[in-house]
Image (cartoon, coloured by chain):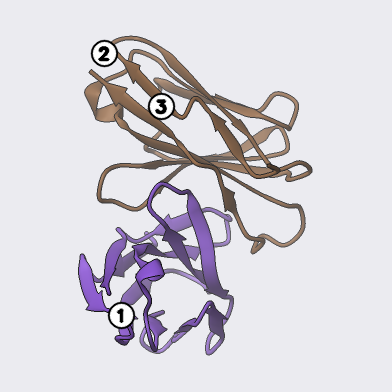
Amino acid sequence: DTGVSQDPRHKITKRGQNVTFRCDPISEHNRLYWYRQTLGQGPEFLTYFQNEAQLEKSRLLSDRFSAERPKGSFSTLEIQRTEQGDSAMYLCASSPPGLADNEQFFGPGTRLTVL
Amino acid sequence: GDSVTQMEGPVTLSEEAFLTINCTYTATGYPSLFWYVQYPGEGLQLLLKATKADDKGSNKGFEATYRKETTSFHLEKGSVQVSDSAVYFCALRNQGGKLIFGQGTELSVKP
């Protein structure tokens, strides 16, 4: 399968713990996006990388959230001191170089439950 | 800021019925518009897109026309099938490249 992959698919944690998610984009896609989707809502933009540079961060991304893409390939999203309000589906998407209109291909998501 | 509003669901139709899911947007500039679909247990997939005013996107029998004058991008299909049951998301893409989604509309098609 050469699509966007995310790991883990599900994560259950206790409030106050740190969690880290990984996203592997489609090979040679230089743009990588993170979104968060809560139940009954559409995905909301969190942050965006072009190669290894983080070019935009949403105001939704509090200081407890950090994302990296160290070599311009896979990306990690870390949430420190999780809160119950962080429970959501975290989606990763990638798109190829070229036009900004290029399609974003989404991964299956990581479902986070904070108890 | 930019935003997307789509009709609330769930929408329940009988097989072969006509489908319309309304979507309107607010944006500065000239965004591209998209419909994404999420089938049960699967990830988001692009259904169709339109990049400028009066463009019509189409795929799998679904159509949507970019109407700048009414800031709308309504999704239509002439004859729905049970396999079309899914959640449909309207979205816009601004100059920054990020997608801004509506809240989603769940469609359920009964045989």
Task: Judge the density around disc 1: few (<14), some (14-19), many (≥20) Cα neighbours within 10 Å.
Answer: some
Q: Nearer the viewer, residue A94 or B78?
A: B78
Q: Report helix, strand or loop for mark 3.
A: strand
Say which residue appears at 53% left-offset and 77% top-offset: B60
Dot 2: few (<14), some (14–19), or many (≥20) neighbours within 10 Å?
A: some
Residue B63's x, y, as percent? 48, 83
Using residue B109 as the reference point, say whether residue A72 is left or right of it.
right
- A94 to the left or right of A96: left
**Chain ID at mark 2:** A
Residue at image coords 40%, 46%:
B41
Residue A24, position in %: x, y?
A: 65, 33
Residue placed under numbered mark 1 in the picture: B15
* The chain coloured purple in the image: B
Please state which amino acid type lies under the numbered disc 1. Answer: Glu
Amino acid bearing label 2: Arg
Residue A15, disc: 2
Q: Which residue is mark 3?
A: A10
Q: Is residue A11 visible?
A: yes
Whether residue B8 appears in this view of the structure is: no
Q: Chain of mark 1?
A: B
Q: Residue at x 25, y 50 (%)?
A: A40
Give the percent coordinates (x, y) of residue A7.
53, 26
| Residue at mark 3 to residue at mark 2: CA–CA distance | 16 Å
Quadrant containing the C terminus of chain A is top left
Number of the front mark, 2 or 1:
1
